Amino acid sequence: MILFRFFVALANCFALAVNARSDMPEPMIITIDGPAGSGKSTAARLLAQRLGFEFLDTGAMYRAVTLAALRFQSELHDQTALSRLLDTLQIELPRDRVVLNGEDVTSLIRTPEITAASGPIASSPVVRQRLVEWQRKIAAGRNMVCEGRDQGTIVFPEAQCKFFLVADAAERARRRQRELQARGEPANFEDVLAAQQARDARDATRAVGPMTPAADAVLLDSTSLSIEDMVTRMEQAIRRHALAPASDNQK
Ligand code: DC
């Protein structure tokens, strides 16, 4: 099954290479989806850097809306209130920063409180609809690596290359625990694992934009692969089948 997905994905990349033979190659969207702790943010950032593409962290957008909702005490499940709140928000993502209505909230959106409260926001149909629109607008006409849960399925179903990252649950929880400890927030492994399982289940089963691999995504398991190696595999697949000069593709 994984092999089948891999060949479908490579066929898509090849189709792009054919398009790229015209004088003006189409902008390219690469999607990377997967659960928390699968390494997708780091991989997406590094891949974008290596390809000279821009990077879109869609989780940061859900986090910024969560922060705004908590601040304005909007009831987190009230769709009408959330819709009104969204009308007042402007989210900008300059390099490695998140700016909400002009305020730099880069660190504020990474707290465990925001992570915990992001559930109802990520499950909200009105929030998802709006953020999908914003994400498409941001990416229009650009070469971009887009990272999240629904990028390959809902937001960019036509993306030329799609990856879905997985990793062993205990390894993902250890990574998250180390991340929290590095920020001076000691965390118990069992608690981190339990919270992660709850998030995985919620992300995978919500009615709108559930986390699931696109049928044409390449599945990569990051459990025992370094980020560098994983990105090298992604880059090789993309370069070989999508960015190679036309003459190479004819060989
Ligand atoms: O990837 P992250 O932990 O920064 O994501 C924050 C929250 O947003 C988390 O609840 C998952 C959710 N999310 C989503 O539902 N769809 C996306 N495309 C990205 C993130």
Image (cartoon, rainbow, N blue to C red):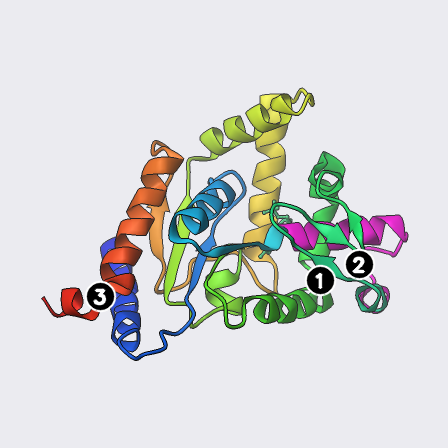
Mark 1 lies on residue: 124
Local packing at callout 2 (Cα closer than 10 Å; few below 14, some 14-19, many 20+) is few
The secondary structure that dominates the magenta segment is helix
Mark 3 lies on residue: 245
Give the residue at x 58% y 23%: 189
Q: Is residue 1 visible?
A: no
Q: Is residue 44 left or right of residue 160?
A: right
Q: Earlier in the sequence, mark 2 or mark 3?
A: 2
Amino acid type, mark 3? Pro
Whether the residues at callouts 2 and 3 have beta carbons within 8 Å, the answer is no
Q: Earlier in the sequence, mark 1 or mark 3?
A: 1
Distance between the alpha carbons at the discs numbered 1 and 3: 43 Å
Give the residue at x 50% y 72%: 141
* Picture coordinates of residue 49, whole percent (x, y): 44, 47
Mark 2 lies on residue: 77
Whether the residues at callouts 1 and 2 have beta carbons within 8 Å, the answer is yes
